[in-house]
Amino acid sequence: MKNRMNNQHMSAGFTMIELIFVIVIIGILAAVAIPRLAATRDDAKISKMANAIQTAKSEIASKIIATNNIPNDGADNPTREKLIKNYSNTITEAIISRDANITSVDANVSVITFIDKDSGLPCKTLSIIGNKTTDDVVLSIASSGNSANSSICRGVDQPSWQTTNISGGGPPGRPTKILNPKAPSGLGGHF
C-alpha cells in the first residue's frame, strides 16, 4: 500500500526538466516575437506620418481651391496658425497630439513640421509658399535632414512626394487650378 501511494505522488506534477524545457521554449518565442512587434509599431508610425502629411497637403490644396483664399495672409504667427488649422483637420490633430508644429518664415511662407515623437526630431516639412497678393501658391514637402538619426524619419523619406503648384490664389473671383495634376505613384496621393 505504501508503494502504491509513492507511485501516485510522483506522477501528480511536472519534473524539473519538463519545466526547464517549457521556460526555454517560451524564452525563444519571446526573443523572436518582441523585435517583430517593435518593427510593426515603427511601420505603423511611418504610415501614420506619411498619411498625415499627404492628407494635410490635400486638405490645404482643396480648401485653397474651394475658397480661393490662402492661409498665409501676412499676419502674425498665431493668426496664421489659426488659419492653417481651419484649412486642415489633420494639422489640427497633429498639433494637439504634438506630432507637428507651425512656424512662419515670412509673410509668404508657412512651414508645418512633422515630428518623430520618439526621438523628438523633425522629419518632414510641408511648406505653404504664397499669400493673398501672389498669383501662385506652392505646397512643398521636404525632408528635414534627420533621416540618418531616426528610423521613423528614414521610413517617411520617399522620392514620390511631389510639389503642388496652385495658380490663381490672387484676387477673388479668379479661377483656381492645380498646375501639376499628375498624381505620383505610391503614397504620393492626389496632389
Image (cartoon, rainbow, N blue to C red):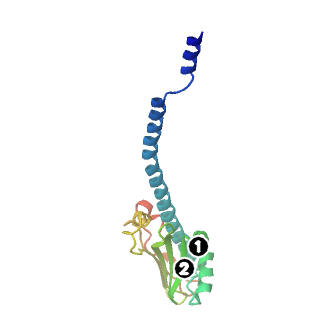
- Residue at label 2? 102
Q: Which mark is residue 95?
A: 1
The image quadrant of residue 157 is bottom left
Residue at the extreme top of the image, as rendered:
1
Q: Quadrant of the N terminus?
A: top right
Image location (x, y in percent) of residue 102: 54, 79
Amino acid of disc 1? Ile
Amino acid of disc 2? Ile
Q: Is residue 74 left or right of residue 30?
A: right
Q: Is residue 143 left or right of residue 1?
A: left
How many other residues sit within 10 Å of disc 1, few (<14), some (14-19) or many (≥20)? Answer: some
Residue at disc 1, secondary structure? helix
Front residue of 190 and 176: 190
**Please, is residue 183 above or below residue 22 in the view?**
below
Image location (x, y in percent) of residue 66: 59, 75
Image location (x, y in percent) of residue 120: 49, 71
